[in-house]
Image (cartoon, rainbow, N blue to C red):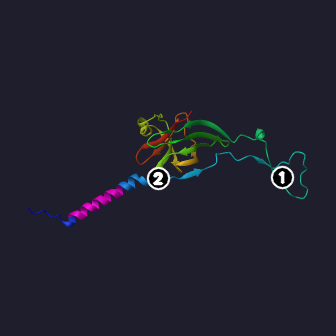
Amino acid sequence: MRQRRRHPVVLAVAALIVVIGLAVGAALFQPWQLFVNTTVDEARPGDSPTVTSSPLPGSTPSTAGEPAPARQEPSSQRQPTTEVLRTGNLISHQHQTSGKVLIVRLVDGRRVLRFEDLNTSSGPDLRVWLSAGPVVRGRGGWFVFADHPHAELGRLKANRGNQNYVIPADADLDQLTSVAIWCKRFRVSFGAAALA
């Protein structure tokens, strides 16, 4: 009995379909992101010390036209530059996630969300969301935030480190009581924190 030979064109088309499928899958899921880590280390807003140009105690101002030496005020005399409004600790959702979240108010009234010691997986299209959704542990919390009002603060700058995100002036922190690292492409939370 003779074996049927498959036509070379059919084999070529099948191989091309497989290659295209793999390329599309790789472009969507970006599996290499799981092995790529980026770090950002931004200073905490308002942490720069206050410097004055008043003369040091017991010294006389310079008479040669040079400015008096600047001095740093003792910490007890410094004006506070930030006020912590909310804090929370990140829990894991779809990916292992840890770190601390702070919301601080600067002296000019602006509010900033800050991640400290963030550690999560990299992924496609990760965003930082302030949300009205509850933080639920385990798989049940992965998709919660899609069903609640939120304010997007921007793309996640890096999957590790310390980073700051300006909060819009009209964001109501009495309603937006959680933060999520949200994968916009797959509509899933990598990790989240309840803000208290």
Q: What range of the chain is rendered magenta?
A: 10-24
Q: Secondary structure at mark 2?
A: helix
> Residue at point 74% right, 40% down?
79
- Percent across and percent down for residue 138 are 43, 36
* Apparent side of residue 32 relative to residue 109 in the rendered image (left or right): left
Q: At 90% across and 46% down in the image, what residue appears? A: 58
Q: Position of residue 80 (x, y in %)?
A: 71, 40
Q: Nearer the viewer, residue 126 or 97?
A: 97
Q: Give the side of residue 130 with respect to residue 52, left or right.
A: left
**Eye-nearest disc, 2 or 1:** 2
Look at the image and tell me in which quarter the N terminus lies.
bottom left
Q: Residue 78: give x, y in percent of width and height.
A: 75, 41
Tell me the quadrant of the picture where the C terminus can be found. top right
Residue bearing mark 1: 69
Amino acid type of disc 2? Phe
Q: Amino acid at mark 1?
A: Pro
Residue at mark 2:
35
